[in-house]
Image (cartoon, rainbow, N blue to C red):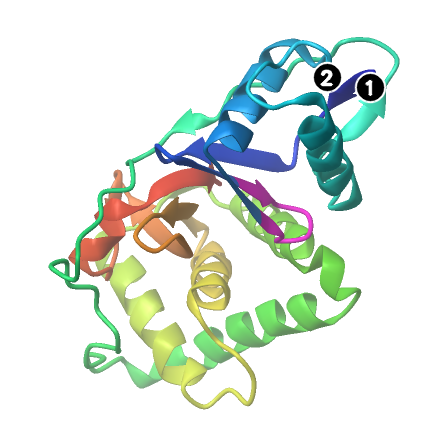
Amino acid sequence: MGYVTTHEHVSTVDLGPATVLVDYRTGGVKVLSGPSARWWTELATTGDTATPTALDEPSAQALTGQLQAAGLLITGESPRPWPVPTTGRPIVPSWGTQEVQAGRTPIPPVRYRALPLAALALAGVLTVAHTGPARTRMARLTRLIRWATLRTVRPAMIERALEAIHAIRRVGMLAPGRVACLEESSAVVLMLAAYRQRVTWCHGVAADPIRLHAWVETDGQPIAEPASTSRYTPLRTI
């Protein structure tokens, strides 16, 4: 079948019986389980489709074709191994015993003067997100986050970071379109960059069920996040 490799914008995490592939150009997600997950790990170490043993040849050919069609594998003329999946927090069935926050907690009061900047930051994020092909939306947002971060000179003070998050969430309630964790966290980075302050933008995956989430941190601690955020394994940080 030849040689293959994956893109730099593809990140993977091993959650135990399942391996999750996230394309940070398109935002696409693929979940491999059982023999398919082991096959991906074996293939990553060689880049040669003839070497993995976890799948029979017809199944391996079919999966290779599916991953190529999804843009997660590309062909090559020589072996080009890539990093094996990051070890994540494994899937541990909770049988309904784990609680995950389903709604928003009340948003604390925010200084009025912080709201116009929050509105501008969120408007910038939504403009970037919705201007251009939907297929490259995630790539545009991560480029915006990197651009904003390069213009900072010091870490954000916790009080400033909290105010930014709460302000973004307040104006997000008035936005006409979707404003969820990805848009919120991107806007927080942009707003703080106006003060030349930075936070760490994180995007990760959790299991039971498999889900994605974006948040911001300072000093390695998630800001204004529920305890359930600790269940996510970061795949990309900026």
In the rendered image, residue 42, in percent from the top left (x then y), is placed at 56, 15
- Marks 1,2: beta carbons within 8 A: yes
Q: Using a 10 Å C-alpha cutoff, classify the residue at mark 2 as few (fewer than 14 neighbours), some (14 to 19) or many (20 or more).
A: many
158 to 236, vertically: above or below: below
Q: Which residue is mark 1?
A: 1
Q: Residue furthest right?
A: 77
Q: Quadrant of residue 226?
A: bottom left
Question: Residue at 73% across / 56% down in the picture?
Answer: 136
> Given the image, on which type of amino acid does mark 2 rest?
Thr
Whether residue 25 is in magenta: the answer is yes
Q: Is residue 187 left or right of residue 7?
A: left
In the rendered image, residue 98, in percent from the top left (x then y), is placed at 14, 58
40 to 236, vertically: above or below: above
Q: Which residue is mark 2?
A: 49
Question: Residue at 16% across / 62% down in the picture?
Answer: 96
Question: Residue at 69% across / 35% down in the picture?
Answer: 63
Q: Nearer the viewer, residue 11 or 238?
A: 11
